[in-house]
Amino acid sequence: MLAVQAEGHEVTTIESLSPDGAELHPVQRAFKECHGLQCGFCTPGFVMAISGLLAQNPDPTPGEIEEGIAGNLCRCTGYASIRRAVRRAVELTQSPPPPASPGTPPTTRGRVTESPPPPASPGTPPTTRGRDT
Ligand code: FES
């Protein structure tokens, strides 16, 4: 599909499956739990294909799983772990994890967080680092 053909349509990306980064999408969790990836090159395509498959068919048969992943190639895993990940994703989507208990800080693993710089004390000259003055 050309990008222009998507005009007026909603586009779901791998990044939007876990928009706040606090929790992985069930398909991403399943890939992690079942070692459904090695180098990771093919993983976004598989995760998106399987997410779409499960959105349309929440409990696919083995044949439907094969058909659902048929458009993606993986040079590393041999597909057995990917098939296990699909079956695990089915389990996870049918019984989502309990919500985090109150007071549990959100997970920031995998994200780059940057603390704001400390406030300048009175009388401190403005920073000129990185600038030609
Ligand atoms: S994990 Fe390397 S190509 Fe699939």
Image (cartoon, rainbow, N blue to C red):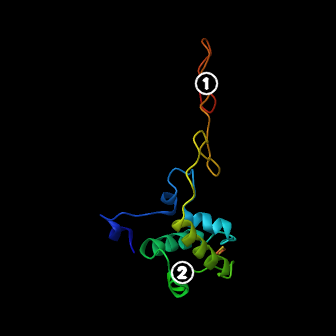
Q: Choose the circle earlier in sequence order: 1 or 2.
A: 2
Residue 120 in picture, x, y percent from top left: 60, 19
Q: Is the N terminus in the top left, top right, bottom left or bottom right quadrant?
A: bottom left
What residue is disc 2 on? 69
Q: Say whether marks 1 and 2 touch (CB < 8 Å).
A: no
Residue drawn at x 53%, y 88% as measured from the top left: 63
Residue 74 in picture, x, y percent from top left: 63, 79
Residue drawn at x 50%, y 60% as measured from the top left: 17
* Residue 106 image label: none
- With respect to residue 129, does 120 lie above or below? above
- With respect to residue 19, does 129 lie above or below? above
- Which amino acid type is marked by label 2? Ile
Residue 23 in picture, x, y percent from top left: 57, 54
Instruction: Looking at the picture, tell me which residue is in the foreground, 25 or 58.
Output: 58
**Cβ(mark 2) to ligand 1 < 8 Å?**
no
Q: Bin the neighbour count of mark 1 within 10 Å (Cα to Cα): few under 14, some 14-19, many 20 and up.
A: few
Residue drawn at x 47%, y 63% as measured from the top left: 13
Query: Which of the 4 image quarters holds residue 119?
Result: top right
Q: Is the C terminus in the top left, top right, bottom left or bottom right quadrant?
A: top right
Count of numbered badges drawn on the protein: 2
Q: Residue furthest top?
A: 123
Q: Bin the neighbour count of mark 2 within 10 Å (Cα to Cα): few under 14, some 14-19, many 20 and up.
A: many
Query: Which of the 4 image quarters holds residue 106?
Result: top right
Which type of secondary structure does the marked residue at label 1 adopt? loop
Instruction: Tell me how far mark 1 sits from mark 2, CA to CA.
Output: 54 Å
What residue is disc 1 on? 127
Q: Quadrant of ligand 1?
A: bottom right
- Which amino acid type is marked by label 1? Thr
* Residue 19 placement, left or right of 123: left
Which type of secondary structure does the marked residue at label 2 adopt? helix
Camera-near label (1 vs 2) is 2
Residue 10 in picture, x, y percent from top left: 36, 63
